[in-house]
Image: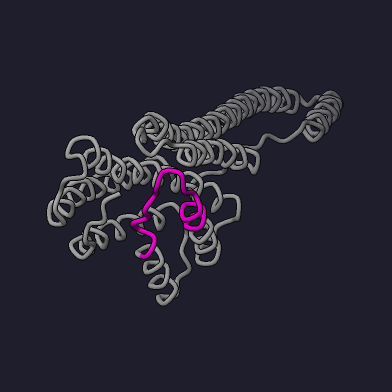
Amino acid sequence: MFSPEYLPNYPLMIICTCLIYRIFRGCLTLRPQRIIRIIFFLILFCLSSPIILPGEVTATLGIFLFLALSVFLFCTDPILIKTAVTLILYPIWTAFYYLTENAGYVIWLHVFHQNLSTAEETLLSLCFYVLRIPFWLLTYRFTTRWLRPSYTNFSSRIWILISVICLASFLGIITFIVQADPYRTYIIWPACAACILTNMGICCLCAFIEQNTRAALEADVLRAQHSYYEDLKAEHLQTRKLRHDMKNHLSVIQSLLSQNKLQQADEYLRSLSRKIARIFISSADRKPSTLF
């Protein structure tokens, strides 16, 4: 494979590192110490341009393990969330970088038949390297909108399932790269595209599950509120009925007293007292209405 000079790539590496850093900071919670954030940025800068060669897997797995260790050390999220985010992002990272790196190699090998000067090889490499900037920008926009683990209330089983799916995607890409024919490396491109779409789809799935969960919770709250207000309405009607009945009872007692029927008035009051006592007892036995 051609070996272009990497000096012109450094400004592009810095831009890509900034985007990668913002993606991880948007998905995970970095520790607040400034020195830790600087170290994490420098680690991402060192890992921002992995050279993924057909038939070789050591560097790819090494970068993955080093990235995972850095995420576990420098982020405060639960382990399952850190694992899932790393397994979502790194296969996308690996697949797209293989595509850009290998596309330049295929053009160098099959179009120019290895007949390029060092400057021309550098220019060809830069053309494909520049594509990484809109890729990371698109990934940043995508993950900011769809992948927000800190706002979700997923169970451990869901995070484990997401990790397993993304791990299967990553292992599939690694297997294809290891077994690639050096002269037909382009046959892996559909698998790389499938990996990117799969892991991006996982982000959409996370957002979909989050929206459905929130909608279900809001529906439960609305049902509870409706039940609560229905109970309030029933109690209000009952209170109005009691006020009306008490007004009638008082009118009857007043009429009996005005006619000097003291015994009948006393019996009526006793009967009314027993009735009121039964009402209070039945009300106390009922389960009180609550909003939640």
Query: Is 224 situated above or below 108?
Result: above
User: Which residue extends farthest bottom?
Assistant: 35
* Left or right, residue 196 beside residue 212: left
Query: Is 290 situated above or below 122?
Result: above
On whether residue 284 falls in the magenta region, the answer is: no
Frontmost residue, 153 versus 57: 57
Frontmost residue, 73 versus 100: 100
Residue at the location (86% across, 26% down)? 267
Residue at the location (55% across, 41% down)? 167
Rendering coords of residue 76 (x, y %): 54, 63
Query: Is 126 situated above or below 174?
Result: below
On whether residue 53 falls in the magenta region, the answer is: yes
Q: Quadrant of the C terminus?
A: top right
Rendering coords of residue 188 (x, y %): 40, 33
Rendering coords of residue 223 (x, y %): 57, 27
Residue at the location (84% across, 23% down)? 264
Frontmost residue, 177 versus 250: 177
* Left or right, residue 16 beside residue 78: left
Q: How is the image coloured?
A: one colour
In the image, the segment drawn in magenta is 46-64
Query: Is 57 situated above or below 210?
Result: below
Rendering coords of residue 245 (x, y %): 67, 23
- Residue 237, located in which quarter of the rendered image? top right
- Number of marks in picture: 0
Residue at the location (65% across, 37% down)? 290
* Left or right, residue 141 beside residue 195: left
- Residue 242, located in which quarter of the rendered image? top right
